[in-house]
Image (cartoon, rainbow, N blue to C red):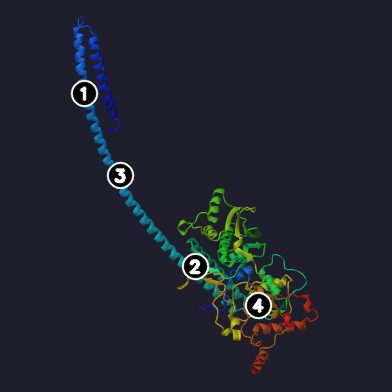
Amino acid sequence: MRSDGYRDHPVRSYVLTGGRAHPTRNTLRPETLLRAVDDGRELPASAGRHERTLVRTCRGTLALAELAAHVHLPVSLVAVLVSDLVDGGYLAVLSTPAHDLPAKDLLEEVLDGLRRL
Amino acid sequence: MSTTNPTRPGATGRVLPWVLVAAMVLCVAALPLVDPSVASWSLWVLGGAAVVLPVSAAVMLSRAARREDTAFRALLAERDGLATSLHQTAQALQGTTAALTAEQEARADQRAAVETAVVSLSRKVQSSAHRIQEEAARMVQRHATDPDVLQTSMRIDHAAAQHARQAQSLVALCGRRPGQTWEDALPLPDVVKAAAGRITAFHRVEVSGDPGLAVTARAVEPLVHVVAELLANATQSSPPNTQVLVVIRQVQRGAVLEIDDCGVGMDPRELSRVRAVAAGEHPVGIADLGEVPQTGLAVVGTYARFLGLRVDLTESVYGGLRAVVMVPGDLTEVAATAPDVLAPSVDEAWAADAGPASSTPRQPARGRSESGTGPGRSAEPSAPGAAAAPPALPQRRSRRAAMDRAPTSGSGLPQVVPPDTDPMSDQTAQEAGAWIGAFFAATADAPQDDPDTHPSVVTDGTSEDR
């Protein structure tokens, strides 16, 4: 049995999201940049530890995938949690979906160039 | 029959001769008083009486003596007979006692054997459920952006969690400690969340109150199980559209969890019975469950005895039942403010990218450790906190944050500084991505980007990179 890298936790992911696996916003992508809204508003007292951790981790700007890596959770799970926080006004989405991604060819060229260095 | 009756004739038989002797003495004494000229016949009578009376007295005495002798011999014989039968009875009793003891021992052995088998099978079931959960987590990690995969994984995880709970209940009813242990203390709200994850209707559980207390590592699993069983009872005995409210309070001698349901409650006699079971006053084993096994409160009682929890069930102000769990102060500690991990995670993708760090030996699954699931593992859980294996992947950190955190390295995010000192080789995909993200962000909203507005960056944000 491969157990490397797996780290168990008593709190299961479906409890964190209340059983939801689909985020309230479908515009969140792994590269979407997030940032904590710094308007002096505190999270409500009922907010859980995970929500506080996400908001705190996003004090600097982070992409969704990075945020997920920081909190050691799958991107799809963090997307659900983050979209709730965005809905609540505690996190802001900095990149818009209209923002075009570079073409795959370009990325591959950059990668090749980097490898040649 | 013959022991009481002969005493009376014997007594009269003993008294009567003396009466006769006394009469004879009177007769002899009367002889000189009688005038011989008046009545010679009375002389004859007195003389005759003086002769006859002692003779008859002697005859009566001898007969009485013979009668007593016979009675005495009968008594002796009876005593001997009784002694013999007593001896026989004692022997029979001894034999029966020996047989009974042997039978009891055999039964105890049998019961122990059955319990051992149940425990070992249950632990196997439990560990296979945990493997299912692990596979579900890996599935999500492999398809990290697909919500449908996440949904499926959640369902599998949920089903397996309930499966594992039932298996662990069996272990508890056999009087054994849980096979699962955790290495880190868990904040009380998370204990309730963890417990909710093991019941069917987890979405009906509502937690409020966070006194900033955590449960020490060794008590995490039993307490989660206790709360899970109480939540399962609460959700099952209340309408499906109602919430089960859990309030956490700090008290002088520890912490209290109150679990209220909105059901119909229980009649007083039944309530007093289940109270005793839940408080652990009488041990309830697997053999005492009966035809309709109600394992929940029996498990609660077992763990309450193990841990010294105080569990009580009362009428709830909401109409249903209120379960109160008092966690003693020696099982609580101050909760760490920055939890390391929030839910099960798989780090293998990052470990593969980590370059130099991946050459360090891979650590086995951290967090959950099971015992008794395979050969070479002891039946009792390992000492908590022992062998707290650090994650193998390098963690990005700011030096300042690392220095701030150094004295309290027992909690908080990463605990392991990568051993290599080459700054370039630490750079992971996270770091590179974060740098680019920061770069974009800085160009996107440079005017508001005043570092003074958020001076207290606790975690490894990107603000320092700017």
Residue in the image at 18% along x and 11% along y: B44
Residue position for label 4: A70
Task: Tell which subunit mark 1 falls on.
Answer: B
Task: Tell which subunit mark 3 falls on.
Answer: B
Residue contact between numbered discs 2 and 4, judged by CB atoms under 8 Å: no
- Number of the label disc, if any, that sits on residue B58: 1
Q: Residues within 10 Å of mark 1 (few under 14, many from 20)?
A: some
Q: Position of residue B91 (x, y in %)?
A: 30, 49
The foreground one among B288 and B251 is B251
The foreground one among B101 and A64 is B101
Displayed quadrant of residue B14: top left
Q: Amino acid at mark 3?
A: Leu
Distance between mark 4 and mark 3 Cα atoms: 84 Å
Q: Residue furthest right?
A: B447
Q: Are marks 3 and 2 on the same chain?
A: yes
Residue position for label 2: B380
Q: Amino acid at mark 4?
A: His
Say which element carries label 3: helix
- State which mark lies toward you, 4 or 1: 1
Task: Tell which subunit mark 4 falls on.
Answer: A
Task: Tell which subunit mark 2 falls on.
Answer: B
Q: Amino acid at mark 2?
A: Glu
Q: Residues within 10 Å of mark 4 (few under 14, many from 20)?
A: many
